Image (cartoon, rainbow, N blue to C red):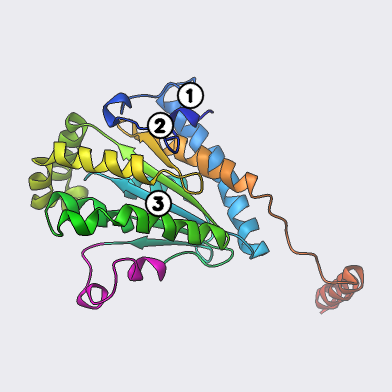
Amino acid sequence: MKHKKYLVQPGEKIKIKDFDPNDSSEFEGNKKDGKEAILKVNKEIEKLQELMYAEGKQRLLVVLQAMDTGGKDGVIRKVFEGVNPQGVRVAPFKTPSPLELSHDYLWRIHQQTPKKGEIVIFNRSHYEDVLPVRVLNLMPEEVWSKRYHHINEFERLLVDEGTVILKFYLNIDLEEQAGRFLARLEEPDKNWKFNPGDLEDRKLWDAYMEAYQDMLNKTSTKWAPWYVIPSNKKWYRNLLIANIVRDTLVDMEMEFPAPPPDLEKYHQQVLELVRSHEKE
């Protein structure tokens, strides 16, 4: 499954409207086939994540950004289903606390970055500081406009220190968002997800699209590029991201640590222990 067509090439200017949120062209199959394919890729991710945890040398940071109902929670559930919770962590970023506001805006972010052997998924991220901060006029332009450079250099630091970064913008359209809002209101097990404030953000859709477009164009770098993921079809969104994550982990060329010396000697000792219990 190819995914380069969804990559925002560093230095090139893209327009979000040129990316079809309904696209599923890189998979030859229907929704049922796609869901079955996700399960297979998920098993591969599970094994690769176990390898990463065992090796304890490399780090992976996955950044998810989207408009409301874009599917960040769904990606986390479906792509990382079954992974060892000792080596995978989700870091959600909501409204900053008073303590966080007393520091620079990247302070709370840096504390959540992955340690060696760990995958961390950012559910929203440092990019909130060039998205709602910009659209809702929470900071003057002279402040937030400098943050693209800050963020690029912050991510360069992480990469230079051994972190691999994947960044996904989950691309939905207004029609799909409306349908998902309706599902949250009509399905009892989704009622808790509905936030009336999301309807206010929807009124600012064009301003948000402009902010997202600038984010993609100004912060898709060689060391931490963005992918624009078509997300109207949940199964395709999940399959595409799962493939990118799996391929990235494979490319990291991880190895299990060397076993203890004289392994055969210990094998024999353990066999004798087992046999002694069988005689009892």
Which residue occupies 47% across, 48% down? 224
263 or 274: which is nearer to us?
A: 263
In percent of width and height, residue 260 lies at: 83, 71
> Three-letter amino acid code at disc 2?
Tyr
Closer to the eye: label 3 or 1: 3
Which residue occupies 57% across, 51% down? 46
User: Which quadrant: the N terminus?
Assistant: top right
Based on the picture, tell me whether residue 110 belongs to the magenta stretch. Answer: yes
CB under 8 Å between discs 2 and 1: yes
Residue picked out by circle 2:
236
Image position of 125 (left or right of 2): left
222 or 110: which is nearer to us?
A: 222
Residue picked out by circle 1:
27
Q: Which residue sits furthest front? A: 142
In percent of width and height, residue 264 lies at: 91, 68
In percent of width and height, residue 71 lies at: 31, 43
> Three-letter amino acid code at disc 1?
Phe
Distance Cα–Cα, label 3 vs label 1: 23 Å
- Span shown in magenta: 94-111
User: Which quadrant: the C terminus?
Assistant: bottom right
Badge 3: residue crowd in 10 Å (few <14, some 14–19, many ≥20): many
Q: In the rendered structure, find residue 63 and report the number of the disc placed on it.
A: 3
Which residue occupies 23% across, 77% down? 102
